[in-house]
Image (cartoon, helix red, strand yellow):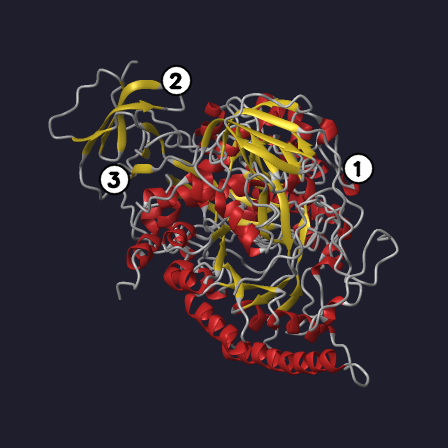
């Protein structure tokens, strides 16, 4: 099932989903809630993102990986007002543009990490910043990652310097249903709302296997069958809740049913408005989860970690479920014991959507390197893996998993100017992101300290020179 | 380039039990590490030892010849900190052998916990890692680390040097062993060394019970003697600048051979470390601040190296020690010279562990740990095409290659 993206946000204007606007959203219009969209008639912590002004940029004579077609040599990329105007062989820079010489450099779309705990498990990593798992109940669909997110996490600038422009900040995997995720532009900000990607649908974090059954072994679930029973019980409740609300919205007679945050989120999963991101390692368990989704009529947008994805790559392709994987993590628990470095390439080869994710404050800084390891593993195994495919693992495919592929993830005219200029081949260990444009804004420049963001935490705690 | 004959008898043969075999790796670009690159060079191996390195080498008629034209030939990679053979599946305690309860475990020697059949060993070798320090963790004095050749069926085959180092933790992880304060940790460690020294001087008194009570059992004090003698290094985890300085102070007081591991803020005391010639074993990708080091930086290795500090690079992912070469590549990305980075995963770790007489470079007489690469070993596009440990080519088969074979085409081959 295709989940339609929200109203086109190409203009970069704030798209508000709420009728009941917050104090700062004086420019908002107040759309009437459509039938069956009861979760939208209240303020839902709307995005207050504002695109930052930047002069138009014309990058000339670069190698361009658009993630939408073949690699282009000696190509130019032109963007203005946050949008890509053209990508191609043009050599003449528009008069209004800042010209950046791309000779010897590579240009790619901004990298999108669809599995991050930045901000919710922030550095310096003390108990005080441990806000990623509401491990008090196996089903916490009522919690939202954005309500934990700390925009001053010092890991954020490190990830920006790695060419990341968008992340999905997820709750952890302690719970069967961990809560809502947030899709965020990775920019310095005072609040998470300022980072929220306008129009991005919410995600729901679910987790299979060892984590929930370990965390809840005393009170349950303590087995995989207990895990399954837990998801089913939650969605049975959600079905009833959805029915009640849909009936009320249709007739509007009497008092509205009681509101339940947990079931409100799950009902929107059933309506296809919230995308399911499911932490799941083992092949057989992913098959169970796809059955569960069928039982309740929803769709899993992407499995995450998917260490055994290669065993069911054909099924993932057939079912249209993306696979967000590490390049080579394995062996840290039984359900990750069967890892192979060819995982992403085998999933790609089978026709499913492969995504390289980080799940790590370290990995997110070098997601291009993770993709490189996975790509060369595929090439060496004779799978014919290409660079054009591998760049999509980092950009177009995670954009799809997050439901924002109509507005970012490729270098195509009309999309947001989320652009990275690399010092060289992004699939080489030696290359660095030199410039990162987020929605057209130069958020990072390796050669200009004025464009190297620091968080409040960095100030006065680190010896001079951090970020070099 | 001159070639050298093996000076027989200088080094004991570690390759016992192997078939006498001569291998000539011919025509590659050879990076001996101990000296400059050799174009179109040959590495000649006999009976597990390197017998010649250079050009114009006469290859014996019975030699197995490996054509290395267009390839890069390096020493086997030396991983200076692993738990190889000691731990298997991270979350499964039944497969963990590297930790003993208690704070002071100087006598804890992990040798008989080593599992030569570990499925992680072949994976580590996949990318040219041939030698590894494997050691204990936990407490203040974790115990004794070993040096392993990553090939063999029995514990004896793997162990190359035992012990190779004494592991001590001065990071904030060990604070509890000092009663909750770092100051307590140093106090306790000083007392331990003082007692070890006392024990050495008065062993007969100790045995006759004619001494005051010492802070650790005799076995631990015994085990500390090679550290006090400077025969094995005190392999010390320290990250914060002040902890590195405290470790240096302690080493100075007791004339210990110190090696720092972690070294997040080592760059801040680079000159001090260089003056003391103390090696720093570090992960060059460690850059997230925490209270054990608020000033990490990605060019830590570069700054240290340029100040003259011996730098050793490691890869911390215990399931992917194979990525050691990319750790070195990333150090280059962050400013280190390529030759220095290769040295930091070959000769420098061998030196830091005091085994550079046998390991770390392609030199006559050294153990024949050699890797033939399809390209630049520090970058992703290359692969290890041939890996020799003690002069024997190792198989590329791993659990992972078997899984790949089974599932490469679906449905699987059950």
Looking at this view, is B165 or A240 the one in front? A240
* Residue A361, percent from left and from top: 62, 47
Drawn side of residue A398 relative to residue A41, left or right: left
C-alpha distance separating marks 2 and 1: 44 Å
Would residue A107 be visible to someone looking at this image?
Answer: yes
Residue A167: which numbered mark, if any? none
Which chain hosts label 1? A
C-alpha distance separating marks 3 and 2: 25 Å
Residue B36: which numbered mark, if any? 2
Residue A459: which numbered mark, if any? 1
Residue at the farthest bottom position: A254
Say yes or no: labels 2 and 1 on the same chain.
Answer: no
Say yes or no: labels 3 and 1 on the same chain.
Answer: no
The residue sitting at 70% across, 70% down in the picture is A37
Give the SS element for disc 1. loop
Which chain hosts label 2? B
Which chain hosts label 3? B
Looking at this view, is A62 or B105 the one in front? A62
* Residue A45, percent from left and from top: 78, 59
- Image quadrant where one finds the N terminus of chain B: top left
Residue that numbered label 3 is attached to: B392
Looking at this view, is B349 or B267 the one in front? B267
Task: Name the quadrant containing residue B356.
Answer: top left
Q: How many marks?
A: 3
Task: Name the quadrant containing residue A244.
Answer: bottom right
């Amino acid at each position: 099932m295709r989940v339609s993206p929200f109203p086109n946000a190409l203009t970069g204007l704030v798209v508000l989903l709420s009728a009941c606007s917050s104090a700062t959203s004086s420019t908002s219009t107040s759309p009437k809630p459509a039938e069956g969209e009861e979760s939208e008639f209240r303020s839902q912590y709307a995005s207050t993102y504002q695109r930052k002004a930047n002069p138009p940029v014309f990058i000339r004579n670069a190698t361009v990986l658009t993630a939408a077609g073949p690699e282009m040599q000696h190509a130019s990329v032109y963007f203005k007002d946050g949008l890509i105007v053209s990508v191609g062989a043009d050599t003449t820079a528009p008069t209004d543009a800042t010209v950046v010489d791309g000779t010897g450099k590579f240009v790619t779309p901004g990298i999108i990490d669809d599995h991050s705990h930045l901000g919710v498990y922030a550095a310096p990593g003390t108990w005080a910043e441990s806000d990623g798992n509401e491990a008090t109940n196996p089903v916490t669909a009522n919690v939202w990652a954005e309500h934990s997110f700390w925009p001053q996490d010092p890991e954020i600038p490190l990830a920006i310097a790695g060419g990341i422009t968008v992340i999905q900040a997820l709750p952890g995997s302690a719970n069967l249903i961990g809560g809502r995720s947030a899709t965020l532009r990775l920019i310095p900000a005072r609040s998470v709302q300022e980072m929220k990607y306008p129009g991005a649908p919410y995600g729901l974090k679910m987790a299979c296997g060892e984590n929930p059954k370990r965390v809840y072994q005393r009170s349950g679930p303590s087995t995989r069958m207990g895990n399954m029973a837990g998801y089913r019980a939650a969605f049975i409740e959600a079905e009833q809740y959805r029915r009640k609300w849909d009936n009320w919205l249709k007739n509007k007679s009497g008092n509205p049913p009681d509101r339940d945050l947990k079931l409100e989120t799950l009902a929107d999963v059933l309506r296809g408005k919230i995308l399911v991101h499911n932490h799941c390692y083992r092949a057989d368990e992913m098959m169970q989860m796809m059955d569960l989704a069928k039982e309740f009529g929803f769709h899993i947008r992407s499995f995450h970690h998917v260490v055994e994805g290669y065993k069911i790559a054909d099924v993932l392709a057939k079912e249209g479920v993306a696979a967000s994987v590490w390049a080579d993590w394995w062996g840290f628990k039984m359900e990750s014991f069967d890892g192979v470095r060819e995982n992403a390439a085998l999933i790609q080869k089978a026709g499913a959507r492969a995504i390289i994710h980080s799940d790590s404050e370290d990995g997110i800084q070098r997601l291009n390197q993770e993709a490189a390891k996975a790509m060369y593993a595929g090439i060496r195994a004779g799978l014919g893996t290409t660079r054009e495919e591998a760049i999509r693992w980092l950009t177009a495919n995670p954009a799809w998993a997050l439901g924002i592929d109509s507005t970012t993830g490729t270098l195509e005219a009309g999309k947001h100017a989320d652009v990275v200029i690399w010092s060289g081949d992004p699939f080489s260990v030696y290359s660095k992101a030199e410039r990162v444009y987020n929605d057209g804004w130069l958020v990072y420049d390796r050669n200009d300290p004025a464009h190297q963001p620091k968080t409040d935490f960095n100030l006065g705690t680190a010896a001079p020179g951090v970020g070099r | 380039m001159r070639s050298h004959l093996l000076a027989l008898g200088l080094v004991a043969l570690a390759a016992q039990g192997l078939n006498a075999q001569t291998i000539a790796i011919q025509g590659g670009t050879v990076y001996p590490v101990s000296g400059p690159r050799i174009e179109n060079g040959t590495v000649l191996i006999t009976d597990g030892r390197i017998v010649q390195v250079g050009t114009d080498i006469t290859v014996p008629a019975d030699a197995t010849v490996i054509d290395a034209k267009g390839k890069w030939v390096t020493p086997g990679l030396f991983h200076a900190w692993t738990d190889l053979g000691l731990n298997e599946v991270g979350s499964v305690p039944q497969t963990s052998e590297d930790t003993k309860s208690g704070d002071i475990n100087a006598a804890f020697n992990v040798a008989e916990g080593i599992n030569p059949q570990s499925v992680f060993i072949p994976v580590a070798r996949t990318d040219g890692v041939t030698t590894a320090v494997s050691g204990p963790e936990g407490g203040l004095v974790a115990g004794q680390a070993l040096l392993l050749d990553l090939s063999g069926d029995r514990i004896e085959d793997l162990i190359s040097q035992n012990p190779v180092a004494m592991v001590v933790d001065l990071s904030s992880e060990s604070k509890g062993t000092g009663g909750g304060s770092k100051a307590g940790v140093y106090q306790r460690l000083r007392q331990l060394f003082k007692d070890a020294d006392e024990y050495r001087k008065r062993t007969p008194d100790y045995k006759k019970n004619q001494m005051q009570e010492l802070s650790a059992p005799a076995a631990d004090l015994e085990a500390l003697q090679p550290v006090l003698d400077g025969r094995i290094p005190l392999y010390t985890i320290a990250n914060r600048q002040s902890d590195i300085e405290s470790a240096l102070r302690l080493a100075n007081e007791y004339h210990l051979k110190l090696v720092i591991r972690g070294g997040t803020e080592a760059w801040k005391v680079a000159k001090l470390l260089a003056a003391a010639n103390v090696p720093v074993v570090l992960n060059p990708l460690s850059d997230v601040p925490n209270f054990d080091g608020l000033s990490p930086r990605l060019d830590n290795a570069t700054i240290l190296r340029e100040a003259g500090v011996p730098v050793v690079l490691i890869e911390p992912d215990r399931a992917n020690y194979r990525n050691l070469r990319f750790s070195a590549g990333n150090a280059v990305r962050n400013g280190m010279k390529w030759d220095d980075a290769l040295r930091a995963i070959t000769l420098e770790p061998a030196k830091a562990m005091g085994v550079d007489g046998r390991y770390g470079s392609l030199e006559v007489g050294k153990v024949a740990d050699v890797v033939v690469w399809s390209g630049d070993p520090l970058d992703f596009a290359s692969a290890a095409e041939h890996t020799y440990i003690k002069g024997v080519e190792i198989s590329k088969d791993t659990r992972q290659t078997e899984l790949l074979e089974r599932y490469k085409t679906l449905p699987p081959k059950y």
